[in-house]
Image (cartoon, rainbow, N blue to C red):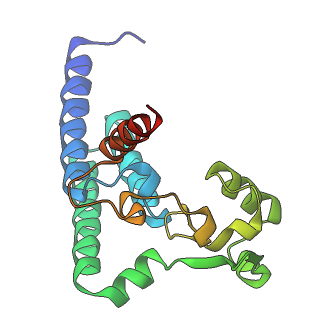
Amino acid sequence: MALHWHDFLTELWRTGLLYVLAFTVFRLMGKRSISHLAPFDIAVVIIIGEAVAIGIEEIDKPIWNAVISIITLGALQFGLTWLNTKWRTGEKVSQGVATVLVRDGKMLMKAMGKEHMSKADLTIALREQGYEKLEDVRIARIEPTGHLSVLPVDQMKPVTVKDLGLPQGETLKSYLDRRIKELRGGLT
């Protein structure tokens, strides 16, 4: 079956229109990266992608079916996001809440079961964040996005300029340079 110019041009404008529409809807949905999307957000992205694909592939169906679906899904998602910024309870329901998996170096097995996370999965996630031993973790929680947040015990926290008690405006580098000069002066 040969492709006719009319079919080619129809496919071209349908694809372009749906591309621009999907691009616009995704831009209006916000700037969170894919790694920070909640599972429902990812589902909406997939559903919109499917609506675009159907609109492109099924040339015998009116393009307005896809356009209406994409706009409706985008509006619903935008509305839900707006509602979540105004109503914390709504956000908890639609996005979920963080679950503590480790407290004071101990795995909370009930919470891990609720989140379907094995000991091995948690251990790997902790190692990826630089924590070899469970005892080094004060609190680890799985966020609604699936990201693991870790608060270390005090001994594992990195030293900050504030911890060193440096004067306002002094950097760690300038402090070390000054101390080296002082020590070298004391050696001569």
Res 58 seen here = yes
Q: In the rendering, at what x and y percent does residue 156 appear?
A: 61, 62
Q: Residue at x 27, y 69 (%)?
A: 76
Answer with the quarter of the image where residue 149 lies: bottom right
Give left or right: position of 176 versus 143. Answer: left
| Furthest residue in direction top, as rendered | 2
- Does residue 71 sit above or below 83 in this rendering? above
- Does residue 28 sit above or below 142 in this rendering? above
- Does residue 149 sit above or below 103 in this rendering? above
Q: Residue at x 37, y 9 (%)?
A: 2
Answer with the quarter of the image where residue 142 lies: bottom right
Res 117 seen here = no
Q: In the rendering, at what x and y percent does residue 178 appear?
A: 32, 42
Q: Residue at x 25, y 45 (%)?
A: 22
Count of number-bearing discs: 0
Q: Which quarter of the rendered picture does the N terminus lie within?
A: top left
Q: Nearer the viewer, residue 38 or 70?
A: 38
Q: Residue at x 77, y 78 (%)?
A: 106
Q: Nearer the viewer, residue 117 or 51?
A: 117
